[in-house]
Amino acid sequence: MKIGVLALQGAFREHIRMLQALGAEAVEIRLPAELDEADGLVIPGGESTTMRKLMADFGLVGPLREFAASGKPLFGTCAGLIVMADRVGGRRQELLNLIDIDVERNAYGRQIDSREADIFGEALGPEPFHAVFIRAPQILGIGPGVEPLAHYRGQVVLARQKNILVATFHPELTDDSRIHGLFLRMLGRRAR
Ligand code: GLN
């Protein structure tokens, strides 16, 4: 199983490191043709406006939509979640539209650029997950097909819709690999 990590911009190296630590093969993806060899894809955190522009410049929007439509798992963190969301600030964005959520960018305010907090969720087991939020978005609403997997202050911060997994925080910046493990299990289930 080979996992691609979109490497246009942002924290892609950290995702590769964590996936490799879990024994998975992880490769950088920049070109549409490189998507063909991947069984799953991570879209990392970074800056969603830059990523959005680069995705269009590299001709990746259509191929990424097809990749998701084929049923292969995708995992978006922070800016990766934003570019995968159907709505931003209540308005539909014309982009990947992979998951039925409404997000608000930089939702914790400018004064507190980043924060670390324990989050909880059944999908993670009994132990809290120490989440790193960096200029993080908030999920304002989820559609009926979206399964909330973890919460912080009553808000959904980790969610899944079929083959799409999203987190508002940066699980690749900790040494807790449970969420990447969850993603690898989504790939494993598909392979069986
Ligand atoms: N604030 C960024 C954005 O809106 C996301 C930050 C991140 O990915 N850590 O794109």
Image: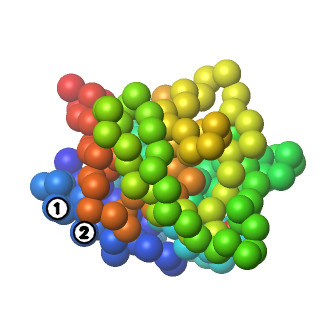
Q: Quadrant of ligand 1?
A: bottom right
- How far across and down, in percent of the image, does residue 160 sit? 51, 35
Q: Residue at x 67, y 58 (%)?
A: 137
Q: Residue furthest right?
A: 91
Residue 131 is drawn in which quadrant?
A: bottom left
Which three-letter amino acid code belongs to the residue tagged 1? Ala
Q: Residue at x 62, y 43 (%)?
A: 153
Work out whether residue 78 can be spotted. Answer: yes
Note whether 45 is above or below 180 in the view shown.
Answer: below
Residue denoted by label 1: 21
| Residue situated in front as seen by the camera: 29 or 84 | 84
Residue 47 is drawn in which quadrant?
A: bottom right
Mark 2 near mark 1, Cβ–Cβ under 8 Å? yes
Q: Residue at x 37, y 67 (%)?
A: 173
The secondary structure type at the circle numbered 2 is: helix
The secondary structure type at the circle numbered 1 is: helix
In the shown orientation, is residue 66 left or right of residue 112? left
Q: Is disc 1's CB within 8 Å of ligand 1?
A: no
Instruction: Say which quadrant the C terminus sits in.
Output: top left
- How far across and down, in percent of the image, does residue 162 sit? 49, 29
Work out whether residue 66 can be spotted. Answer: no
Answer few, some or many: residues within 10 Å of disc 1's Cα (few below 14, many 20 plus, some between 14 and 19).
few
Q: Which mark is residue 17?
A: 2
The total of numbered circles placed on residues is: 2
Q: Residue at x 62, y 62 (%)?
A: 136
- How far across and down, in percent of the image, does residue 124 sit? 35, 36
